[in-house]
Image (cartoon, coloured by chain):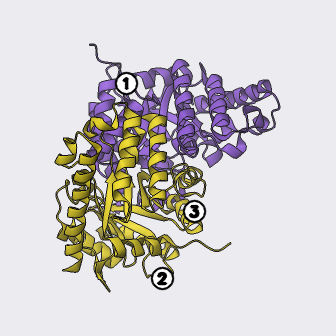
Chain colours: A purple, B yellow
């Protein structure tokens, strides 16, 4: 059996080809246009599959937000499974935004549920929470190595409350820096074959560009998953603050946009699928151009 | 509309009546006896319902481990829903061990999914991760107040890796103490009407009795959810180290046991439902007696 292509190599190839945009698939039910249906979980699945269809060939990664699917219980999780399968068929990288974390045997459950070969909601990577310690991340790393998958560990998130603990000084450096430093041995185990980058990403909010630069020094091989761009307020230059020079401009991560892509005003008022398609296509193109300009300037 | 009975009052009444044992419902598939079936999610649901039936009238709280249900995708989540509904009918308090945490709109999704009035997996409380900050806990607190529910925030967990970040010094005190201190205003908002206790619990591992005593001082009104007793190695005296004197002995939380209750050796080898029932009943009685002795000595 040949070992699978590491996630790092697949990620860098895709972002260099298509640009650094990651599209967040966050089914805020009240905002989903009626043309996708009015039954909760069914509308969520229809809308999610439509988002995937718009992303195909235009973006490298999509990031479904597990909580907003889970809101609808097992039917919502079935909708999430439909979206993941559609994304896989569309050759999109899937970052499952689940922010899981638990002790050994349960962490194995979560890792197999999303990264395993027979995962119901097949994903290329999953966001994980480091609060419980490195032993709780180990099962995710093991499954990721075996399957050519990745993980994205919360370091400095984009919400105001990230200042409460993450930014506080833990024995001489901010907690988020301690997390990044502690992760380096795990990051090395997930390093690509064709690139220097690792399949261990760090979540580094666009709202903290200074922190992103500090994180880049502490974790030189970890690509960043950058939330906070677009509707959350940060611009493209802030979003790529932790990127570094590569052969084709700045590289080193993906920048997520959710509401600004999937709920643009023109899409909200769409009365036909075609109008909705055009509105979302325009939003994808605008964000991708904005971000490509930032990494090439 | 009358406001619902606060979770704190329901919790203290139940534990005083039945004892401090919380039974962890952790469906480790490889250990589930064949008499519950061999199809993954179906066997998990059958086994979970059988555990609930044994707990009825004998314990105050059950704690389903979300990750081990989620392992089976949407079918596993449907099994979790069956278990929660069965527990609700059996008058058991349900602590959903999901360790969720996310920014505002997603946190609302998780809170409604488990604590909401129309939750698919109806629960009385949910475990949450504080790493992202207080604003990410706020939606859980709001839903908990509205519905008479609770939350259990990870403070000092029972796994070895809890030393990596939780136990490190954050500006003059261990991170887990900073978390507990920061939570006090939220804890006050969830205080009971009939008791001084709050519906905001803290996870305080039995493997760290010294830390539990420190946590008790920092968070005098937060009941503890204590993992690590039984199969994980800690004894009853360690598990109740953070409890305080009350009218009926030590009080101030629940002590979880999972494998030692639901997978005792005699249950593993059971060839009939009756044999399995007797083995689990004996394990419940032994743990409850052990813990009651510890709180009454």
Element assignment for label 3:
helix
Task: Work out whether residue A233 can be spotted.
Answer: no
Residue A195: give x, y in percent of width and height.
36, 23
Q: Is there CB contact under 8 Å for labels 2 and 1? A: no
Please name whichever residue, A256 or A240, is drawn nearer the observer in this view of the structure: A256
Are the residues under marks 3 and 1 on the same chain? no
Q: In the visual, does B210 lie left or right of B2? A: left
Please name whichever residue, B192 or A171, is drawn nearer the observer in this view of the structure: B192
Q: Dividing the picture into quarters, in which one does residue B139 lie?
A: bottom right
Element assignment for label 1:
loop
In the figure, B175 relative to A114: above or below?
below
Q: Chain of mark 1?
A: A
Task: Work out whether residue A263 can be spotted.
Answer: yes
Q: Chain of mark 3?
A: B
Residue mark closest to the camera, 2 vs 1? 2
Q: Residues within 10 Å of mark 2 (few under 14, many from 20)?
A: few
Residue B194 badge: 2
Residue A117 badge: 1
């Amino acid at each position: 059996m040949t070992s699978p292509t590491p996630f790092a190599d697949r990620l860098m190839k895709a972002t260099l080809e298509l640009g650094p945009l990651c599209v967040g698939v966050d089914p805020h039910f009240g905002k989903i246009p009626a043309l996708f249906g009015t039954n909760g979980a069914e509308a969520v699945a229809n809308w999610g599959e439509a988002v995937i269809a718009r992303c195909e060939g235009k973006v490298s990664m999509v990031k479904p937000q597990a909580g907003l699917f889970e809101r609808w219980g097992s039917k919502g999780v079935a909708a999430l499974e439909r979206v993941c399968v559609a994304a896989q068929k569309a050759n999109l990288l899937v970052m499952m935004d689940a922010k899981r974390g638990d002790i050994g045997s349960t962490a194995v459950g979560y890792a197999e549920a999303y990264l395993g070969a027979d995962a119901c909601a097949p994903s290329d990577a999953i966001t994980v929470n480091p609060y419980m310690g490195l032993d709780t991340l180990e099962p995710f790393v093991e499954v990721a190595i075996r399957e050519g998958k990745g993980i994205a560990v919360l370091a400095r998130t984009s919400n105001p409350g990230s200042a409460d603990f993450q930014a506080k000084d833990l024995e001489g450096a901010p907690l988020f820096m301690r997390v990044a430093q502690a992760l380096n041995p795990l990051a090395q185990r997930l390093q690509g074959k064709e690139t220097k980058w690792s399949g261990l990403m760090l979540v580094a909010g666009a709202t903290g560009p200074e922190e992103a630069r500090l994180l880049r020094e502490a974790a030189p091989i970890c690509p960043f998953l950058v939330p906070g761009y677009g509707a959350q307020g940060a611009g493209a230059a802030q979003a790529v603050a932790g990127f570094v020079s590569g052969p084709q401009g700045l590289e080193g991560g993906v920048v997520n946009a959710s509401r600004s892509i999937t709920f643009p005003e023109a899409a909200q008022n769409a009365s036909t699928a075609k109008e909705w398609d055009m509105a979302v296509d325009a939003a994808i193109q605008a964000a991708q151009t904005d971000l490509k300009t930032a990494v090439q300037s």
